[in-house]
Amino acid sequence: MTVKNSALGVVRLTRDGRRRYDESAKRALIESAPRQGVSVARLAQKHGVNVNLLRKWITKYLMQREAVVAGSIRHNINTADPIFLCWCGLRG
């Protein structure tokens, strides 16, 4: 990912000093983090974000992605299927 302005865009600064970041830039940063050979600490430093905050964003993103995948799998299971019933122990 080549970024000319490496700092993440701050959309809003609240009274207590918290920053709200541009969602599209934040998502691009999160999606570039899990690649092999990419240091999360270095990536956070490069973009001017606290490493713990970036790790929190990544964890939240991965949990949401996992929930969507699990939901689609659950949706595609036919509970009347004999194979499913045998697997659950409901049919001998």
Image (cartoon, grey):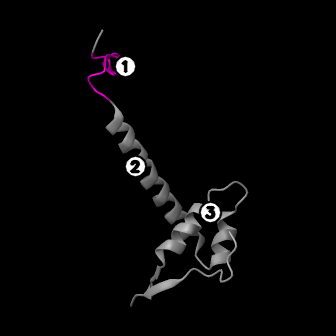
Give the CA distance from mark 3 to mark 1: 38 Å
Q: Residues within 10 Å of mark 2 (few under 14, many from 20)?
A: few
Residue that mark 3 sits on: 32
Q: Residue furthest bottom?
A: 15
Q: Residue under circle 2?
A: 68
Looking at numbered disc 3 in the image, what kind of residue is underneath it?
Answer: Ser
Front-most of 45 and 1? 1
Q: Which residues are magenta?
A: 78-90
Residue 35, above or below 70 = below
Quarter assignment of residue 8: bottom right
Please indicate whether residue 53 sits to the left or right of residue 80 in the image: right
Write down the quadrant of residue 28 in the picture: bottom right
Taking the spot 69% from the left edge, 81% from the top edge, the residue there is 4
Earlier residue among tags 2 and 3: 3
Whole-percent x, y for residue 52 in the image: 56, 68
Closer to viewer: mark 2 or mark 1? 2
Q: Is residue 10 left or right of residue 48?
A: left
Q: Which mark is residue 69?
A: none
**Mark closest to the chain's N terminus, 3 or 1:** 3
Marks 2 and 1, Cα distance to the nearest angstrom? Answer: 23 Å
- Residue 65 at what x, y percent from top left? 45, 52
Q: State which quarter of the image contains the C terminus.
A: top left
Q: What residue would you read off at disc 1?
A: 87
Q: Callout 2: helix, strand or loop?
A: helix
